[in-house]
Structures are given as C-alpha cells and as structure tokens.
Amino acid sequence: MAPTTEPTGTPVVQMTGITIQFPGVKALDDVDFRLFPGEVHALMGENGAGKSTLIKALTGVYAIDAGEIRVADRTHRFSGPDEAQAAGISTVYQEVNLCANLSVAENVMLGHEPRTGPFISWRKMRAQAAEYLARLHLDIDPASLLSAHSIAVQQLCAIARSTVVEAKVLILDEPTSSLQKAEVDELFEVIRELRERGVAILFVSHFLEQVYEISDRMTILRNGRLVAEHRTADLPRRELISLMVGREGAELDAIEDGVQSAHRERPADVVPALAAVGLGRDGSVEAFDLDVYPGEIVGLAGLLGSGRTETVRLLCGADRPERGELRLAGETVKISDPLDALHKRIAFSSEDRKKEGIVGDLTVRENIALAMQTMRGVWKPLPRKELDEVVAKYMTALKISPADPGMLVKNLSGGNQQKVLLARWLATAPRILILDEPTRGIDIGAKADIQKLVTDLAADGMSVLFISSEFDEVLRVSQRIDILRDRRLVRTIANGPEVTQDTLLAAIAAKGEVA
C-alpha cells in the first residue's frame, strides 16, 4: 500500500480554474488539480470525464481557454509538448511513442546524444544509456533494436528517457494496459523508486486494484468537472466508483413498461445458444466462461477498461482467442473473423459507430445493405426489390427519421445513425446479437426505442449480449449480468427486483477471487 501521509510543501504542478471548450462541448469546466513532489497521484474518471484533456492541457497539446498552470512555482502557457518537457514534464503514453526501428540507446538518449564535435559518440551514448537503464533495473543491450523487446521493456525505456531529461513530473497514461502481472510488478517497483527520488507521478489507469496499490492520492473527474480529491487510503472502492459514475438519476424512467426484462425460468435441458469455455487472450482478457441462452439478454457490466469489449471481440472473431473454445448450440466451432461469425449468424455492433460502423458518405440504404451484401459476395448483388423491402422493414421497425433511404447517413442524428447500424445487423437475421454501447451519446427517445427493440428481439428468441456503461440500462434490459473487473469475469448475477446499481457497484468494487 502506498504511503498515506498528506503532501507537504509547494505543489510541483498547480492547475487552477482550467477550462477548455471545443465546438459544442466544454471538455473541462473550471477544474483545479495539484500534484506534489514525491507522490503518485491517480487521475480517475470514466470515458469522457476529461482526464486526457487535462493531461493535454498540462503538456501543451491543448491551449486552455481559462485558468492558470503553474509548474515549479512558475506560471506557464505551453504552446507544445517540447515546452512542457523543457519545464520538466515527461509523458509515457499507453501506445509507446518511441522509434521501434532505432536502438534502445538511441531512443533513451534521443535529443541528448553525447558528441565529439559535430559527431555522435556512439560508444559513450550506449554507455550512458546503460547507466540510465540500470537505474530502472533494466539489464538489456543498449545496442539492440527497441522493436526486439516487449511492450513492458519499451515502456521502461520511455521512463528511462524521462530520467535523462531530469523530469520533475512523470505522466503515465494507462501504462499497464498491455502488461502481464509480473511486468506490472516490475513497473511498480520503478515507480516507487522514482517517487522516493522526489519525482511527482501522475498515474492514469482503469485498473482499480492497481490504483489502490500504487497511488497516494487521487483526483476524480466527471463530465469535465472536478468531483473530488482524496487520499487513496481514505476512499473506499465503492465510494470511488459512485463518484466516477455519478448519481444523475434515471434518465429513462419514461420508457414503456415492456422494456424492463423480467427474469424468466428456462427448462433445464435447454442448450446455450452461445457458450465460451476457458476463452482468453494474453494482454486482452483472462480466460472466462460465459453463456447466453435462446431468448436471453445477458448484460456485461464493469468500468471502462474492465475488459467488456475485449470479451465480446473474442466471441465474434474480431480478435482470436489463444485458449479455450467456443460452442454454438452445443457444437464446438472456430470463428476466424467477423464475416465468418456473420455466416454463423452472430452479429457484432461495435461501440465506435463512426470508425467501425456507419459509412458517412453512403446512403441509409447502402449502409443497411453492407453486411447482407458482404455475406453474399461481390459477384452476387442484392436484387433491388429485396433490398428495398428489407430497408423499409427496418426503417419502420426502428423509426429511423427522416424516413428517406436515399439520404446520406452522415446527415442523420447520432441516434438515427445508431438505428441504421442496428438495422444493418438485424438484416442478416442473426441468432446471436452482440451490442457494445448501442445507446452511447444518443438522446433519451432513441435510447428508449433501442432498448424496447432489444427486449422484443429477445422475446422472439434472439440471444443478446448487451454492454453499457450505464448501470440503469444494464439492469433494465438484462436477465443476467456478468461483472468484469481488471479484464476478468468475476461474477454472474441473476437480475431481479432486489438487484440494484449498488449491487453492481459492490460486485465491481469487491476484492477477492471470482464468485
């Protein structure tokens, strides 16, 4: 456990009243933040809370619209990351921002190469790099290519580079997302040693166990605003999660009564429509068992980074599992890619509808037709009459507005774009529908329509896996809820009147093994 004493002295970073506005959205609204020498400070919040924006404000990537940034008791207005680095701020990102085609020594000493006259002294550079690496207990050949080493070693090389510039502040943005447990332990040893040397470390992670293990204090953001600052040891996990997700009330109370899914008993001899047995992938999600029965909606709940998306990507062939097996209606199958999944009547709707979903410059009709046409192949075009019938059917069922199949989909609202995406997958007549954040960023009415559709599909026998960051929504539509934490499936809860948001929060926050 990290030290629990209050910080003393002057903050090395003091951000006051930070406000950043983008067109149509206030990304940060009057946020205060302070970071002291010799502490590990966790920055917590869900997706869209403002964590990345705050880091980019501190490192000069974004200009602030209001507020003040003080580093080492001097006011700064950084115009770019180089100025921030010159002030003693170094950042190690989730995606290592080094040059994999160069040697370890070249990466560590980049911009600080020892020279003899105008020429780089390669021997001295490798020797100096070895000294900086040794401080991090990293015994590797400085002359070796960076690409020859694991992500964990590359991240330590990035940290070694920050010690070359004598950083006062080290920002670690999701540094453990691709690491195994032993590698995380090594990284944490390095973090503790840097903390002892007086380096201020800003730590961003969605892994709660790691946050509680390594951090001294934490700042919680929500919707671009400061919620609280706490000593880590004084803030129970459950309270932290409540602060992160908020208690804004039930947005969808007006949804039709039929949306709430009742827990239904099923005959004992029914075979799951889909079952995963020991399925897993290193660096993605630990081995898990999961099943969903015909006519059942199974919700996946957990904080951002808990492994929800990684889990369903293994089920639909978007990522390939390294262990375990997948069964459809009791028969073991292998799914090579999402197209193979479609042929096996599994449809996956990604959470990123703009990058992995709709094609903005195509029409509504063309977007709905994409999956059907892909299944048929390029040489078997869909007959126009058949296509028009399918498009009309789902535009009516989903209340897509405007009701013009020839309109470019980029001109529709976000909610109607999401409905077009759903229509695309429903047009393939799937037996299993996997929905990853199907209502994110859309209005209440569109949410109601989509939730009602999902429960109607299940009532007609379709199996649905439903991911949502909104616990109210998961509770509203699911018969069972699988809880994920730190990329592990830790518990399955049968939904019922006694199951509440607090039940899910407690399951997410609980310590211990899988239950």
Image (cartoon, helix red, strand yellow):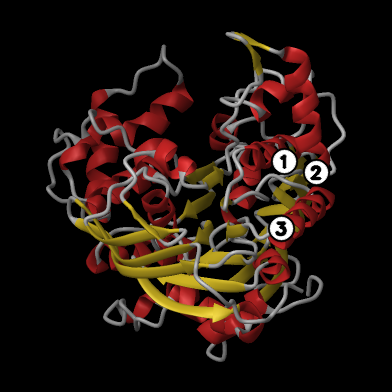
Q: Give the amino acid type for the residue marked by disc 2 in the picture.
A: Arg
Camera-side residue of 168 and 442 = 168
Quadrant into which the N terminus falls: bottom right
Q: Residues within 10 Å of mark 2 (few under 14, many from 20)?
A: some
Q: Give the amino acid type for the residue marked by disc 3 in the picture.
A: Arg
Location of residue 326 (image quadrant): top right
Query: Where does the image place residue 41, in percent across and percent down from the top left?
Result: 58, 66
The structure residue drawn at horizontal position 31% and vertical position 58%, both measured from the top left corner, is 441
Q: Residues within 10 Å of mark 3 (few under 14, many from 20)?
A: few
- How far, Cα to Cα, is label 2 from label 3? 11 Å
- How far, Cα to Cα, is label 3 from label 1? 17 Å
Asked whether, in this view, residue 14 is left or right of residue 343, the answer is left
The structure residue drawn at horizontal position 55% and vertical position 84%, both measured from the top left corner, is 239
Location of residue 344 (image quadrant): top right
- How far, Cα to Cα, is label 2 from label 1? 11 Å
Asked whether, in this view, residue 309 is left or right of residue 187, the answer is left
Dot label at residue 135: 2
Camera-side residue of 150 and 290 = 150
